[in-house]
Image (cartoon, helix red, strand yellow):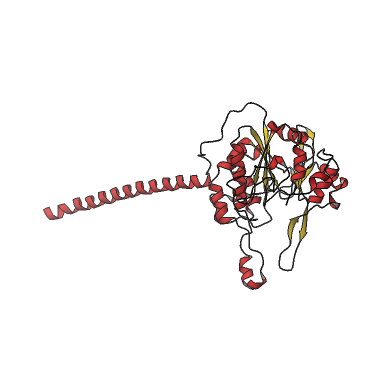
Amino acid sequence: MTKKAAQPVAVRHVIWLSWKLVVLLSVVLCALALLRLHSHSDLTSPYSRPRPRIYRHKFEGTPKIAFLFLARRNLPLDFLWDSFFEGADVASFSIYVHSAPGFVFDESTTRSLIFRGRELKNSIQVGWGESTMIAAEKLLLEAALEDPANQRFVLLSDSCVPLYNFSYIYNYVMSSPRSFVDSFLDKKEGRYNPKMSPIIPKQKWRKGSQWITLIRSHAEVIADDEALLSVFKKFCRRRPPLDARKGKLNLKLQKQHNCIPDEHYVQTLLAMSDLEGELERRTLTYTQWNQSATKMENKGWHPFTFDFESAGPKQIKEIKEVNHVYYDTEFRTEWCRSSSTLVPCFLFARKFSQGAAFRLLSNGVVRRSDASVLLDSPP
């Protein structure tokens, strides 16, 4: 009898241990779930805990525009920019140039005194369609942010030209409390790589022109970013061009995502930072696009290069008269306004040859009369 009475006690003990094990297991699973959720939250919102701003300085005085030149090597249009800056208050602008590593702007490489010594000492080798392009942009911003007087940041290429004189451009840029960033939904191309998720959700993926004009707080966001840049380095790469020697391998290569980092990085970063409401979602730099193709390449859009003949008063006047931009992926018309007044959309244009830039100078676009003296570049 005693033996039979002990059996229910043993059963109850087993049940009790089982429930205890279930409770303990549940607690462990809940803890793991919370840890996973926290980790997932950090990935999807990498900017919920931004790094301390190292560029926050109180500034009083004349605000500057930082002109940031992204050059392959030298600045072939330095003579035009020299005229543009001539007579401007030196307290109202600064110049930074990212060139090839080791390249120095001195008397042997530029006749323009204003560009001498303006090169970054920590420049990197840049390749088109590679993440090194956005890394170079970040280096320019980091350097310019060290000066608290720099309140606006204009990114320019070595083939860009100004369409107006300095005072007009300065007043136009400074009068707006917004950044000018060409940004729109990318619905037509398969550049978004699903492997970017969850760090970059597809609904935040944007496309636009590389040539941006930023207010200081937005420049800080870009300079401080590390999370998105690491994702772009890994998953946003230019598709290799067709190569006849690779034969059937081309079919496999052409299935890769054709992602051009500098056309997506800033736009996507600002969208993920919930800053699109602080933007004029258009660029200040005009580009004329042509569609072309070769035997071994698919059709693609390429920037038209202006030469002496195509940079006449009529063509420049047409660019200056543009007062809106239409984005067909969003059915959105971006009217170019200052307050409630329509203004020209573009302050700069690319790509211009030396001859085209000389014609602009001769026509008085930047108000310089002795243009012929400056055309010859040093060896």
In this rendering, position of residue 33 left or right of residue 367: left
| Residue depicted at 50% across the width and 47% down the height | 43
Residue 215 can be seen, yes or no: yes
In-front residue for pair 188/170: 170
Place residue 259 in its image quadrant.
bottom right
Place residue 248 in its image quadrant.
bottom right
Indicate whether 355 appears above or below 366. below
| Residue depicted at 64% across the width and 55% down the height | 260
In-front residue for pair 303/30: 303
In-front residue for pair 307/303: 307
- Figure label count: 0
Q: What percent of the width, then of the height, locates residue 56?
A: 56, 32
Q: What percent of the width, then of the height, locates residue 83?
A: 78, 40
| Residue depicted at 82% across the width and 39% down the height | 368
Indicate whether 175 appears above or below 257. above
Outermost top residue: 60
Q: Quadrant of the N terminus?
A: bottom left
In-front residue for pair 56/112: 112
| Residue depicted at 60% across the width and 32% down the height | 148
Outermost left residue: 2
Q: What percent of the width, then of the height, locates residue 311?
A: 84, 49
